Amino acid sequence: MPELPEVETVRQELEPWLSGKVIRKAERVDAPEGPKYRGLELASGQTIQAVNRRGKFLLLPLSHGDELIVHLGMTGIISPNDPGKHVRAKLSLSDSEKPFLYFQDARRFGRFLLVKAGDYQTLPTLFSMGPEPLSDDFNPEQFRIALAKSSMPIKTYLLSQKPVSGVGNIYADEALWASKIHPLTPANKVARRQIPLLVQMIKDVLAASIEAQGTTLNDYRTVNGEVGAYIDELKAYGHKEEPCPRCGTAISKIVVAGRGTHFCPKCQKNKDG
DNA sequence: CGAGTGCCCTGACAGC
DNA sequence: TGCTGTCAGGGCACTC
């Protein structure tokens, strides 16, 4: 599932390809009209000014004051080659080498829509999104204040994108494992001394995964069609009943906020703060 | 308004 | 072999 490292990998590949190119035509393909593809056709004739990222969202400001918003959802793949099936959107570009961009999304969780630049009212998660995890805006002081605002389990709160952006199910589990924090610990009960560590582990896990071009479980591919290599580095996620790399105890799997959640019941004990 | 629940959607896989 | 059931989860609508 694409999280920040996967989206950032895609962004880095899209930027040199798309920046400065004219969208000759933008069209829905095998997708119904609706909020996930709203206004897409209006991108036709506009020039792509940049390829930015905010959390797991790709943001492409356009020349006429609009902004193309792309979210890969669970199975979204962007490619210059026609994948043949599950194509939801297609851009025709002023580019002689790679004149088409295909947005493929088997499970339809993704989005590809147009808004007025910077107007994220219709996208509540983007609208109230926390700081970028790899920026200086994400630091122990800021994070402590954010965590104090919620009694939700720390894992649930991380997935909300509010205290910090871009952390999804895989990297939440990994960062909590690395910080030895139980995923059900209420956010406002995370020990003060653990907060700087959690901040650093979120940064480290995400940065290392970007370095490896992300994590491919099933569907995720880079724009060049490559898989992400970070799957080999996962310590907790997907390792149910396997020994914890730190202490050898079997990794547990529970459900938190409807998501499979992996942790070491010995290392990550501080459930009640 | 914060918090909790369930839905969307379809491929992969287990079990029979 | 082919069918059925289960699982995967980001974001958001809905409810309390």
Image (tube, coloured by chain):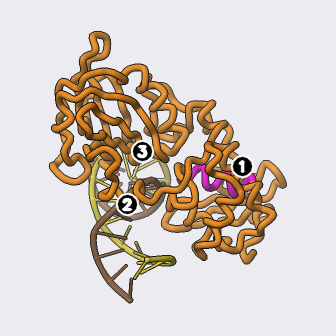
Chain colours: A orange, B yellow, C brown
A173 in the magenta segment: yes
Residue drawn where x is 77% and y is 59% of the image: A180
Provide residue A249's location: percent of width, then percent of height.
Answer: 79, 58
- The answer to whether A263 is drawn above or below residue A88 in the figure is below
Which type of secondary structure does the marked residue at label 3 adopt?
strand
> Looking at the image, is mark 2 or mark 1 earlier in the sequence?
2
Percent position (x, y) of residue A231? 61, 39
Q: Residues within 10 Å of mark 2 (few under 14, many from 20)?
A: few
Secondary structure predominantly adopted by residues drawn in magenta: helix
Of A53 and A265, which appears nearest the observer?
Answer: A53
Amino acid bearing label 3: Phe
**Residue sitting nearer the eye, A158 or B1:** B1
Task: Indicate whether A3 appears above or below A149.
Answer: above
Q: Residues within 10 Å of mark 3 (few under 14, many from 20)?
A: many
Q: Is residue A130 magenta?
A: no
Which callout, 2 or 1, points to the residue nearer the camera? 2
Amino acid type of the residue tagged 2 in the rendering: Pro
Q: Give the chain letter at badge 2.
A: A
Q: CA distance from mark 1 to mark 3?
A: 22 Å
Q: What number is the disc on residue A201? A: 1
Q: Which residue is mark 2?
A: A124
Query: Quick one: SS at disc 1?
Result: helix
Write down the region rendered in magenta. Answer: A169-178
Q: Position of residue A97 (x, y in %)?
A: 31, 11
Disc with the residue nearer the chain's start (1 vs 3): 3
- Chain containing mark 3: A
- Tell me the number on the disc at residue A57: 3
The answer to whether one can see residue A29 in this image is no
Position of A204 with respect to A83 (left or right) is right
